[in-house]
Image (spheres, grey):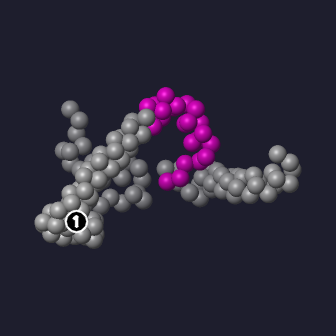
Amino acid sequence: MSAPNFVRNVLPPIVPFVVVTVATELAVRQGWVPSFLVPAPSSVVLSMFRDWPELWRATLNTANASLLGFGMSAIIGSLVAIALSSAAWVQRAFYPYAVFFQTVPIIAYYDERGLVRRVNGMLPIDAVTAEMLKAVGDEARVD
C-alpha cells in the first residue's frame, strides 16, 4: 500500500482509536473514572492474555447459544408467518395477538406486574452484588 493510500484509508480510523484508548487509560489511572465502571485498556489486554482459555470457552458458549436462539427464532417465526398467511381464519384468530405483542412496551408490561427488579449499578461492586442477590432471591442459589 502506498503512503497516500495509507494516510487516506488506514490512518483515519486508527487515530480516534488511539486517542480514545490513551484517554481512557489516563482517566482510569488518574482515578477520574472508577476502574469497576470502565476498566483500563491495559487491564483488558492483560486479562485477554491471562484468561484466554476461560474467555474462549465463554465465547464458544455465547456463540452456541446465539446460533441456537437465532435458528429457533427463524424456524418458529417462519412457521408462524406461514400459518398466519395460509388461512384466513388463522389470521383472524391470531393476528390481533401478534400486533398486541409487537406494540406493548415490554418493561412497562412486567413493571406493572411487579416483576421488574431495580439495582443501583453506581454503588460499589460489593453493594451492587448484594442488591442483585437480594433482587433475585433464592433463584440465584446453586446447590
- Which image quarter holds the C terminus? top left
Q: Residue at x 27, y 71 (%)?
A: 103
Q: Which residue is mark 1?
A: 98
Left or right: where does residue 60 sit relative to residue 96? right
In the rendered image, residue 90 lying in the magenta stretch gets the answer: no
Above/below status of 6 relative to 98: above
- Residue 83 x %, y %: 20, 57
Q: Is residue 108 visible?
A: no
Name the residue rendered at 12%, 66% in the picture.
Answer: 89
Amino acid type at mark 1: Ala
Q: Position of residue 104 (x, y in %)?
A: 25, 70
Can residue 35 be seen?
Answer: yes
Residue at the top extreme, as displayed: 53
> In terms of depth relative to the viewer, which is nearer, 48 or 101?
101
Which one is nearer the viewer's eye here, 112 or 22? 112
The x, y position of residue 43, in whole percent, is 58, 41
* Dominant SS type (magenta): helix
53 part of magenta stretch: yes
Total tally of numbered discs in the picture: 1
Q: Nearer the viewer, residue 24 or 7?
A: 7
Q: Give the extent of the magenta segment.
A: 37-59
Query: Local crowd at mark 1 within 10 Å, few (<14), some, or many (≥20)?
Result: few
Q: Residue at x 15, y 69 (%)?
A: 92
